[in-house]
Image: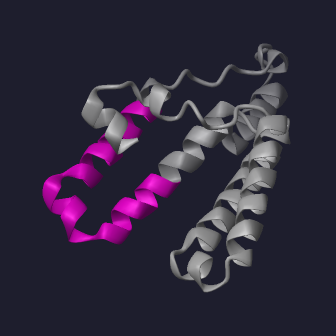
């Protein structure tokens, strides 16, 4: 992906080989397992060069990607949140470098801005009447959100 950025290619072009369906991810995982088996059969050469481990890691990554793509409950918003959480953890692990360069602060400011611009939660239709008992129930439901 860094080479694509140096050449001025869009990020989508750099990820063009990534599987986008469950079948593609499973096929890529099987191909990586086959490569790992082949590199393992080479003996020390495949192991010492790291080819076998890389192929095994790719197979695990594609298996996980296939599971993610197969799961109907995973939404793009959940994937974006997971990516942001991983990025935040990475920045915090870097320590002072991200603090001194302002990367961490810019990320936190962007997250705060995103929270501020998020659409407000719509009240339930059952909360529209103004009876005191309904108001108390609606207040309780809104607190849980």
Quadrant, the C terminus: top right
What color scheme is it?
one colour
Kindly identify the residue that appears in the image at 63 percent across and 41 percent down: 79
Residue 102 covered by magenta stretch: yes
- Count of picture labels: 0
Between 22 and 117, the residue placed more toward the observer is 22
Q: Main secondary structure of the magenta part?
A: helix
Q: Is residue 12 left or right of residue 29?
A: left
Q: Please determine whether, in this image, residue 19 is positioned above or below residue 55.
A: above
In the rendered image, residue 118, in percent from the top left (x then y), is placed at 51, 26
Kindly identify the residue that appears in the image at 67 percent across and 83 percent down: 43
Quadrant, the N terminus: top left
Can see residue 23? yes
Kindly identify the residue that appears in the image at 46 percent across and 33 percent down: 14
In the rendered image, residue 117, in percent from the top left (x then y), is placed at 44, 24
Residue bounds of the magenta highlight: 86-115
Q: Is residue 121 left or right of residue 111?
A: right
């Amino acid at each position: 992906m860094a080479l694509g950025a140096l050449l001025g290619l869009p990020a989508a072009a750099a990820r063009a080989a990534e599987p986008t369906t469950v079948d593609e991810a499973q096929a890529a995982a099987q191909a990586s397992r086959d490569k790992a088996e082949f590199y393992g059969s080479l003996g020390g050469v495949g192991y010492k060069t790291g080819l076998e481990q890389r192929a095994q890691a790719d197979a695990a990554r594609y298996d996980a990607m296939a599971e993610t793509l197969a799961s109907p409950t995973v939404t793009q918003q959940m994937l974006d949140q997971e990516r942001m959480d991983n990025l935040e953890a990475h920045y915090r692990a870097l320590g002072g470098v991200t603090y001194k360069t302002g990367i961490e602060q810019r990320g936190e400011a962007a997250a705060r801005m995103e929270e501020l611009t998020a659409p407000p939660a719509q009240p339930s239709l059952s909360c529209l009447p103004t009876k005191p008992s309904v108001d108390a129930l609606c207040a309780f439901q809104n607190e849980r959100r």
